[in-house]
Amino acid sequence: MERLVVESLNHSYGFTEILKDINFELNEGEVLSIVGPSGGGKTTLLHLCAGLLDVEEGEIKNSFQSSAFTFQEPRLLPWKNVIDNIALGLLAKGADKNEALEKSQQIAIQFGLEKKDFHKFPKDLSGGMKQRVSFSRALVIKPSLLFLDEPFSALDIGLKQELQTHLIELIHQKALTILFITHDLMEAIRLSDRILLLKAEPGRIVKHFKYELPQMQRDNEYIYKESAKILLDQQIIETFELGIK
Amino acid sequence: MKFLLKIIKDFPAYLWSGWGALASIFLFIACWDLGAQLYGELVLPSPLKTFATLSEMLQSEKVWAEIIITTKRAFFGFLISAVIGSVLGLIAGLFATASMMSRPIVTILMGMPPIAWIVLAMIWFGMSDNTIIFTIVVASFPLVFVGALQGTRTIEDDLKEMCDSFHLPPLMKLTNLYFPHIFSYIFPAWVSALGMSWKIVVMAELLASNNGVGAMLANARAQLDTPTALALVVVMIGTLMLIEYVILEPIKREVELWRD
Ligand SMILES: Nc1ncnc2c1ncn2[C@@H]1O[C@H](COP(=O)(O)OP(=O)(O)OP(=O)(O)O)[C@@H](O)[C@H]1O
Ligand SMILES: [Mg+2]
């Protein structure tokens, strides 16, 4: 079975300790969310897991066949149009050019981009459109492990829901494992099997939450109920400094 | 190929946008005519006289031969500095130490007046083509070098990281990330280097050669033949404008469509 295991991971930038003693594992087909306040080290943790940063202390074992990353910012190549940007990962894997473009167009449509946008350069796209392109670029290569760094933050509610529904479908087919970062607790509850709470300064995991009900069956009522519950959790209140003074 | 077609397709629209430029040129000619009336033909020949001399000159094959000699020298010098400047700039950009070390040298090269180079080159190479080409290369090479250096050094780490996350093979990384970015810096540098070459070639010829447009200009000065001198100036400016606005600018517009 493919899995990602993080063991006693520490990380510092200079003398500032960013992450301290992080342990968790992510098994095939699971969705694991990491929630925590801004500046808590979530992006750093994700970059370490994806091998974009070198591990200094501790260990990360990743046995997934393929992975893709959507960054907090869209990071599109400014000199490539929408379709060519999406096709980048496919071409890197050695796919046939025409086939790659074909697939990229299909997924672009699926993620709410329109035909007339296909040949636009990133400078002519709205923030949300850029994020959709970045999302398409990651999913088009059909990765077995997907790293998501707040990919929905620039989208309107409708589109957010649409993309999440699409992800839930893939999760349901057991086609995808996701390591997901978000600020948004409702979003985390909608998508995840497990949630890790990352407290800041230094970033450390202070609590786990588990959701057994399959994502397909989670309706709004369930999500509201669970959100209300989690918001009353003492650790959550402390970590996000929700206490009303 | 698709690219070339698009450049050709957009060309009429680009030409149309030239009306403003044309108007300002005519305004300039009007002022010139006014000056000619005030100061007399000897000091400043009228545009009419100048263009008449010009058209007469252009009928002679000898003049064309001189223009071609000059163009060849300028182009050759430009080519050398474009190639060497791009390659060295790239290499220097890839290594932090190299780019730091090259800075003072570039400053010296850029700060040194071309006229000083001409004198040195005349001592080293005598009155030959080498003197002229050397001066052109020395004056325009730093422009290209700096362009290539900056292009290489300003590639965003974020985009590099993105390419790594998709495991782009090295060659693909080069063609998809490095080249397009660097090109957007190098191309404008080539354009200014070409302009520089064209200016320097005439100056160098004037002082260190007995053929070419520059030498003709020196002759005109010796004989106080102001109309010919002005006609030659018109030839030089005309050629530069032709190259810049008819060839380079349309290319630049297409390759930089993605820019703001
Ligand atoms: N390259 C770097 N060099 C030095 N410090 C860094 C670097 N990258 C991040 N940091 C610091 O590490 C800390 C954690 O940053 P990180 O981006 O991981 O936070 P985050 O949890 O993703 O925040 P957000 O939710 O706002 O995206 C911050 O204090 C940040 O200043
Ligand atoms: Mg972050």
Image (cartoon, rainbow, N blue to C red):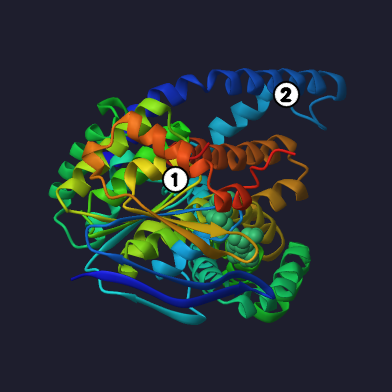
A130 up-or-down from B123: above or below: above
User: In this orientation, which residue lies closer to the viewer: B120 or A43?
Assistant: A43
Residue B155, visible in the rendered structure = no
Specify whether B253 is left or right of B111: left
Please give the residue where the numbered disc 2 appears in the rendered image.
B46
Badge 1 marks a residue whose secondary structure is loop
Of the 4 image quadrants, the one containing the N terminus of chain B is: top left
Residue type, mark 2 in image: Ser
Q: Position of residue B129 (x, y in %)?
A: 57, 69
Q: Residues within 10 Å of mark 1 (few under 14, many from 20)?
A: some
- Number of residues whose C-alpha sits closer than 10 Å to that of mark 2, classed few (under 14), some (14–19) or many (20 or more): many
Identify the mark at residue A180; answer none if there is no mark: none
Q: Is residue B139 left or right of residue A227?
A: right
Choose between B53 and B260: the one closer to the eye. B260
Chain at numbered mark 1: A
Q: In the depicted view, which residue is nearer to us: B163 or B11?
A: B163
Residue nearest the observer in this picture, B237 or A163: A163
Which-is-in-front pick, marks 2 and 1? Answer: 1
Q: Residue at x 40, y 45 (%)?
A: A188
Dividing the picture into quadrants, the one containing residue B88 is bottom right
Judging by the rendered image, the residue that carries numbered circle 1 is: A78
Pinpoint residue A235: horizontal percent, then vertical percent. Answer: 56, 53
Q: Residue at x 31, y 38 (%)?
A: A164
